[in-house]
Image: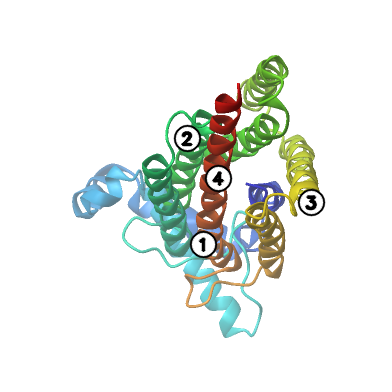
């Protein structure tokens, strides 16, 4: 939910550096890549590379040039460490030890586990909450939107390409917008359906314009950062204000408060930004791991709140 905002802010900052970091600017790295490509990535050498490349690597889209960059990255890192320098970044990222076809193994696994947690909680929600609950359709849709976002996060951390990066960004933005929509339905829409319909149309228009501009005009990291910070702040303030106003009347709302505050606090983990431990576990992966129980808590809140609303609507129906 709100934590996606912080993630997007930090991703955008890193992506802005992706065109050139200390490691990939080094002449030794560039010469190494050039020589590796000339030696291995054309003619008979390329055929030999493809014949010995594991099938899972080729299916994941790893090319000879990608392999050269990976090998030369470690050559450069080794020289830095040998001379007593700090580990450099390459193309806006820390060096990670590849496992099978996973480019960032810990973050990929953590993203998958977040998605799995969302799926388990969706199944639990659908089992325990009747479809007649006023919030049922909106909560189920939010769960599917979240699952889609975690799927693309897993893909992006498995294999970083222009397409997977864009899908990760766009799907994360969609989660934030749908969280705002979820909040609008809960706080306003149950009493004023027409307002929610108009607001839904506005959010869809905003998302379409956002994705179209970044896809068809220019992928502007600065604009993407500003846009996601703005909608993220709306999301956080709206949910938190509603929670504070209803915390005494509705005890289960405290779960939502904890989720909002935890996600904002846990996002600070990414500010640590240190070279990966064992070349696998960095601050971003730790943040992803820490959000798994938070998603469980948020879906628990949605379940409690949906059952409360169902009970309330049934009580009104009996009175009528």
Marks 4 & 3, CB-CB < 8 Å contact = no
Q: Where is residue 196? Give x, y as percent.
A: 68, 21
Frontmost residue, 289 versus 1 = 1
Q: Mark 3 points at which residue?
A: 244
The alpha-carbon separation of the residues under discs 2 and 4 comes to: 10 Å
291 relative to 135, above or below: below
Q: Residue at x 50, y 60 (%)?
A: 292
Marks 1 & 3, CB-CB < 8 Å contact = no
The mark lying in front, picked from 3 and 2, is: 3
Q: How crowded is mark 2: few (under 14 residues within 10 Å), some or many (20 or more)?
A: some
The mark lying in front, picked from 4 and 1, is: 4
Lower sequence index among marks 2 and 1: 2
In the rendered image, the residue lying farthest to the left is 51
- Left or right of 199 in this view: 145: left
Lower sequence index among marks 3 and 2: 2
Q: Where is residue 276? Give x, y as percent.
A: 54, 72
Q: Residue at x 58, y 30 (%)?
A: 313
Lower sequence index among marks 4 and 1: 1
In the rendered image, the residue lying farthest to the front is 319
Q: Residues within 10 Å of mark 1 (few under 14, many from 20)?
A: few
Q: Mark 2 points at which residue?
A: 140
Q: How crowded is mark 3: few (under 14 residues within 10 Å), some or many (20 or more)?
A: few
Q: Residues within 10 Å of mark 4 (few under 14, many from 20)?
A: many
């Amino acid at each position: 939910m709100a934590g996606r905002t912080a993630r997007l802010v930090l991703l955008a900052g890193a992506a802005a550096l992706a065109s050139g970091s200390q490691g990939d600017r080094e002449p030794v790295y560039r010469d190494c890549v050039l020589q590796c490509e000339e030696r291995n990535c054309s003619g008979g050498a390329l055929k030999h590379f493809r014949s010995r490349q594991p099938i899972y690597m080729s299916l994941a889209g790893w090319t000879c040039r990608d392999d050269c960059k990976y090998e030369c990255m470690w050559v450069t890192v080794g020289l830095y460490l040998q001379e007593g320098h700090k580990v450099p970044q390459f193309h806006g990222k820390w060096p990670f030890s590849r496992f099978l076809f996973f480019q960032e193994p810990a973050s990929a696994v953590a993203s998958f586990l977040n998605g799995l947690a969302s799926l388990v909680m969706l199944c639990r929600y659908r089992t325990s909450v009747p479809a007649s609950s006023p919030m049922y359709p909106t909560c189920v849709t939010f769960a599917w939107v979240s699952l889609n976002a975690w799927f693309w996060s897993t893909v992006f951390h498995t294999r970083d390409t222009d397409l997977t990066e864009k899908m990760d960004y766009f799907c994360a933005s969609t989660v934030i917008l749908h969280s705002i929509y979820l909040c609008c339905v809960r706080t306003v829409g149950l009493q004023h359906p027409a307002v929610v319909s108009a607001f839904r149309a506005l959010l869809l228009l905003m998302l379409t314009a956002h994705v179209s501009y970044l896809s068809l005009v220019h992928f502007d990291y600065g604009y993407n950062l500003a846009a996601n910070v703005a909608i993220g702040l709306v999301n956080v303030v709206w949910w938190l204000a509603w929670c504070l106003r209803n915390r005494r009347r509705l005890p289960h709302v405290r779960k939502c408060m904890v989720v909002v505050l935890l996600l904002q606090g846990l996002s600070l983990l990414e500010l640590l930004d240190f070279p990966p431990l064992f070349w696998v576990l960095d601050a971003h992966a730790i943040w992803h791991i820490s959000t798994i129980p938070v998603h469980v808590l948020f879906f628990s809140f949605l379940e409690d709140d949906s059952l409360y609303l169902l009970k309330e609507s049934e009580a009104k129906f009996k009175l009528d």
